[in-house]
Image (cartoon, grey):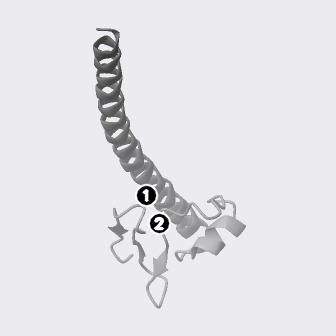
Amino acid sequence: MRATRRMRVVEAMALVAVLCVGACKSNSKASDAKACEADLKTLRTAEEAYHAANNTYGTYEQLITAGFASDSGTNVLHTVALSGDGTSYALPGTKNCPANYTSAPN
């Protein structure tokens, strides 16, 4: 009788664990998406500020040097790709953040 009760308790605990893991994964995906959106918005703002100051768009390194972006180390969600003449830019996503943006030429 005791073994049966223990088994039911263990089964119940396993079920709760499975439900918790599923809930955590969906929360993680939602927060990853929000981080991607925030990074995209921050870089777009940085590019527009850099453009206002320099009349051209900047590389990621130029944005950091000018103080319009911060170095996020290895956690880069987007990269910066400039057109040859610097009149437009693209923010292609990485494997961690597939969202992207391409500006219209000025």
Q: For label 1, count other residues whose C-alpha is less than 10 Å away and answer few (under 14), some (14-19) or many (20+).
A: many
Q: Residue 59: x percent and y percent?
A: 57, 76
Residue 7's quadrant in the figure? top left
Under mark 1, the amino acid is Leu
14 relative to 12, above or below:
below
Dot 2: element: loop
The x and y percentages for residue 103 are 36, 71
Up-down relation of residue 105 to residue 9 (above or below): below
From the viewer's perspective, tell me whether residue 65 is left or right of residue 92: right
The one nearer the camera, 101 or 99, is 99
Q: Residue at x 36, y 77 (%)?
A: 105
Q: Residues within 10 Å of mark 2 (few under 14, many from 20)?
A: many
Residue at coordinates 39% horizontally, 45% vertically from top-left? 34
Foreground residue, 32 or 61?
Answer: 32
Please report the residue visible at 67 percent of the width from the left and 65 percent of the height from the top.
64
Nearer-the-camera pick, 54 or 82: 82
Alpha carbon of mark 2 to alpha carbon of mark 1: how far?
Answer: 7 Å
Residue nearest the observer in this picture, 16 or 72: 16
In which quadrant of the rendered image does the C terminus lie? Answer: bottom left
- The answer to whether residue 86 is left or right of residue 63 is left
Instruction: Name the residue that disc number 2 marks.
Output: 78
Q: Which residue is mark 1?
A: 40
Residue lying at the far bottom of the rendered structure:
84
Label 1 residue SS: helix
